[in-house]
Amino acid sequence: MKRYTSYSDLAPLMAGLPESQMSVMNEGLSSRRLLAMGNPPARVQTSPPKGARIARLGRGMGALEPVSSAPSLTSYDCQFVNCQTAVLLRGAAAHLRNALFFNDLTDFDIATAALDVQNATFDTASYLVAGSSGATALFTNCVLAGVSHLTTGYPTPTGSYNAFYNTTTFGSSAFTSSSSPLQAVGAASCYLTDGSTFRGVGTTAIDSALLAELGAKTTYPPIVYYSAGGDILTSDLYLSPRAPRDTASAPDLSFHYDPIDYAFGHVWLTNATISVAPGTAIGTFATSAGWYGLALAQGSRFYCQGAPTDPVHVVRYNMVQEHSTTAWDAVGPSVMGAWYAGIPAQAAFRFTDWSMPAQDSYDFETDGEPMGPASK
């Protein structure tokens, strides 16, 4: 299977098609990187890939629209950011599982269609749904914050086990909060707040595949290592998974992120050791051009010891976060090795998974200085 990692990769597939028939095939785009569409919608003939991030800037129709011949759409782990209309349905049924909607004007425009949404977060919208009397909209285990209007008149949203802040409530077993249930960390704005009462109160009567998937995901943000002037670490660190995965008997409400346990930006490690345990996820970012996530200076040691079925993950932040802010926008390597002369830095990576969008930067880059032999 060919892996498409940017819109430019998709362009040859769309050559010669009129804008109204541009399509993204399920077997095509499989990156978690931003899928940014221009004025025509992303018209899909089958369900979009897991983890697609769909952003729509400007005016126009739906950002995601099944073609008329598609009987149904099923979407897992998708993010809809800054859309005029996030999802446009005309006759096709839609099942959205673990979805995030951020700062969209209208989340759904549906006519003669059945909409079923489970574990989604809707953060800031003018309208949740707009459409016709022949449509239905069912929501379960969702969080709605700052949604000005539930509907334009049709359809009327229904559901259960949903949570509301600054939004009109609907359905049964509803939860409310007098303060925002969401917090922003890095370039993500939809982590549940510390101590949120929306955790562990959802229903398990949801899609079985979704329920199983949530156990490996989280509603907690990472611990961030960053200082504007550069964060210098001179003490040893042992990093293990710390963002709780949602393995409780009742799931959290809301969208669940892939875990990032720790996020490093412009961190300089010198004369100290970072040891990373199996299953730990490290995110990296930069806030200025040419900066890095973690730099290995003299005397430093960076050891990632994963396991065959529980690897360490080193990922650029935008493989997970929805890019609701530009705080971490600058491009730089995840790890910068052998920075300046002196006692050589050491690094060892066993069963370590590296993830970065195509053409962003390097997973690991050296500055021309030799690395010392790893002693572990």
Image: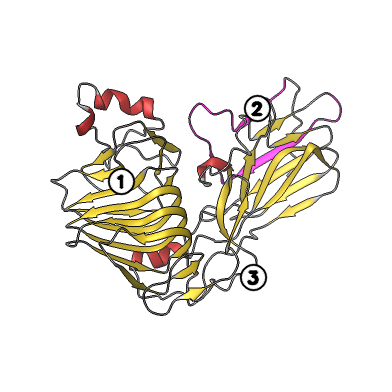
Question: Who comes first in sequence, dot 1 or dot 2?
Answer: 1
Can residue 316 be seen here? The reply is no
Name the quadrant of the N terminus.
top left
Q: Which residues are magenta?
A: 341-367
Looking at this view, name the residue that lies furthest to the left: 69
- Amino acid type at circle 1 is Pro
Tag on residue 197?
Answer: none
User: Can you tell which quarter of the image residue 341 is in?
Assistant: top right
State the CA–CA distance, disc 1 to disc 2.
34 Å
**Above or below, 299 relative to 247:** above
**365 falls in the magenta region:** yes
Whole-percent x and y of residue 239? 70, 54
- Amino acid type at circle 2 is Glu
Q: Are there few (<14), some (14-19), or many (20+) residues within 10 Å of tag 2?
A: some
Q: Are there few (<14), some (14-19), or many (20+) residues within 10 Å of tag 3?
A: few
Q: Which of 234 and 290 lies nearest the eye of the viewer?
A: 290
User: Can you tell which quarter of the image residue 232 is in?
Assistant: top right
Q: Residue at x 30, y 43 (%)?
A: 62
The reply to whether the C-beta atoms of the residues labelled 3 and 1 are less than 8 Å apart is: no
Name the quadrant of the C terminus.
top right
Q: Which residue is mark 2?
A: 365
Q: Which residue is mark 1?
A: 48
